[in-house]
Image (cartoon, rainbow, N blue to C red):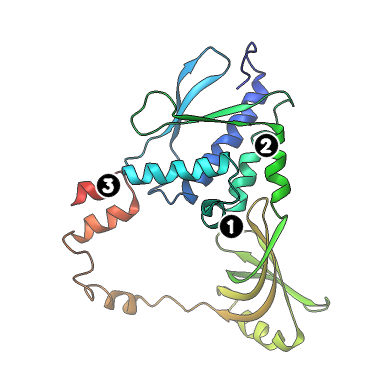
Amino acid sequence: MNKGRKGIPLGKLARITQETLEFLRMAYTDAELPGDPEGWFAYNFRNDSVDFDCECYRDIEADDVKRANSVFRAIMTNDVQGDILKHKVKPSTRRQYSKIAVPIDPDEKVTFGLFINGDTEPGERHDLTKRTAHDIEVELPPAADYYGEIQGTIHSLYKDDKPKRIKVRELSTQNLVDCFFEDSLYKSVIQVLEDRDGVVFVEGFVRENMANGIVESVQARAFRLAPQFDESKFNSLIGSAPSLTGKLTTEEFVERFRGNGRTAENLR
């Protein structure tokens, strides 16, 4: 950052760093890397402008590294024709990358280097400028509409509104989502309201804010209560598929998918 200049305003550095950290977390998830996308460390600080290396301390396979680099490369080159941006990277991740450029001046840039596994210097570098960020933003829709489902608890009912609506507190985000419905679904709403603490599935046409990935509203087509957890049914599944873990013990199988630092290679 700030190449060729002396230092950088501390507030600007803090904003760039915060937006970059959020981008790294989101890209880590899009690349389907194992484990938690936290744990990023900065080191190897150098005095030629603001220059440092950033690494996430996770024990992952070489194929995972290659896949992650392909995701970073697609985002940083804005490869809109490639399959990665079309099918693997969420629009909110691309928008988060563009937000890194918000604090910089029009003549500044933030340069990202990608390391090939084991190299001491980046194998390729990509510049993020105000212009690059603008090109990304204009390509992204402000919202996306799709048929889907949310899960949550009913917060309130507005029966006099036209159309009628309920507010559902989504379980995954704790955000309140407006769920609009026609008069024909009124009885279904009353039925799910009978269980005051019940968890509800709302199915219909979802509108999602692409800037932050938050569901804003649902044009509901169906409401149904989530089934109650039945401990006896759950326990009946234990031991029902003895060959599922192959040569691994149950503990090894679980740890493999928790991504706690033990790789598949270590478990073979």
Query: Which of the two residues, 20 or 1, is positioned nearer the viewer here?
Result: 1
Tell me if mark 3 has few (under 14), some (14-19) or many (20+) residues whose alpha carbon lies within 10 angstroms of its own: some
Residue depicted at x 63% and y 81%: 222
**Amino acid carrying mark 2 in the image:** Thr
Q: Is residue 173 above or below residue 229?
A: above
Sequence-earlier tag: 2 or 1: 2
Sequence-earlier tag: 3 or 1: 1
Residue depicted at x 64% and y 35%: 100
The residue identified by callout 1 is 173
Residue 214 shows in this picture = yes
Residues marked 3 and 1 touching at CB (< 8 Å): no
Q: Nearer the viewer, mark 2 or mark 1?
A: 2
**Amino acid carrying mark 3 in the image:** Thr
Residue depicted at x 64% and y 10%: 6
Cα gap from disc 2 to disc 1, whole angstroms: 30 Å
Tell me if mark 1 has few (under 14), some (14-19) or many (20+) residues whose alpha carbon lies within 10 angstroms of its own: few
- Please state if 161 lies on the left or on the right of 106 as rendered: right
- Residue 155 at x, y percent in the picture: 67, 68
Residue 157 shows in this picture = no
Query: Which of the two residues, 124 or 223, is positioned nearer the viewer here?
Result: 124
**Amino acid carrying mark 1 in the image:** Thr
Q: Is residue 98 above or below residue 17?
A: below
Cα gap from disc 3 to disc 1, whole angstroms: 30 Å
- Residue 226 at x, y percent in the picture: 51, 77
Residue depicted at x 19% and y 70%: 243
Outermost residue, front side: 81
- Residue 202 at x, y percent in the picture: 61, 75
Helix, strand or loop for disc 1:
loop
- Residue 61 at x, y percent in the picture: 31, 44
The residue identified by callout 2 is 132
The residue identified by callout 3 is 263
